[in-house]
Image (cartoon, rainbow, N blue to C red):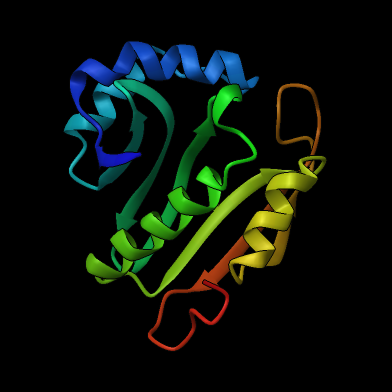
Amino acid sequence: MKSRKMMPQDAGPLNKLCEACGLSPWSEESFLGEVDNPVAQYIVLEEAGKVLGFAGIWCVVDEAQVMNIGVAPEGQGRGLGKQLMKALMAVGRSHGCVVMTLEVKAGNTKAINLYEGLGFERNGLRKDYYPDHSDGILMMTSLLEGADAHE
């Protein structure tokens, strides 16, 4: 498994990965915009030349906001989501961020369990946040040294 920074040629495969995962698909143009976005940091996981996962954050001042994360169906159940989140946390720290925030669909218990296992705590709710009217749970964790006991 190889971890690397997202490149322009990943836009198409990442769009397809989002669709395969049932995520709200980002357009290729959206991914290309993130490649050139100075606050965006995206990681791609690749195995045998195939993209199996990706995740990205925006680092603004001292906060890392998780923008998107996805693991291809054939990569699920292998700990890739956890690997991606740990990598994002390290990237956030390296950019001087002291907290990481994210929002997750209220019914996505698998993701919520992953985030809580990494030290994220629920700190808010966005009612009817998604197009299907489901709620979004806001979560946050500290990136300060010593706060990574869950990793």
Q: Residue at x 74, y 46 (%)?
A: 110
Q: Please tell me which residue lies in front, 69 or 131.
A: 69
35, above or below 87, in the image: above
Q: Residue at x 48, y 79 (%)?
A: 148
Q: Residue at x 73, y 56 (%)?
A: 113
50, above or below 64, in the image: above
Q: Please tell me which residue lies in front, 15 or 38.
A: 15
Q: Residue at x 44, y 48 (%)?
A: 84
Location of residue 74 (image quadrant):
top right
Q: Position of residue 64 (x, y in %)?
A: 39, 59
Q: Position of residue 143 (x, y in %)?
A: 42, 75
Q: Is residue 114 left or right of residue 58?
A: right
Q: Position of residue 10 (x, y in %)?
A: 28, 20
Q: Is residue 118 left or right of residue 113?
A: left
Judged from this view, the residue extending furthest toward the bottom is 146
Q: How many marks?
A: 0
Q: Position of residue 89 (x, y in %)?
A: 40, 62
Judged from this view, the residue extending furthest toward the front is 48
59, above or below 141, in the image: above
73, above or below 55, in the image: above
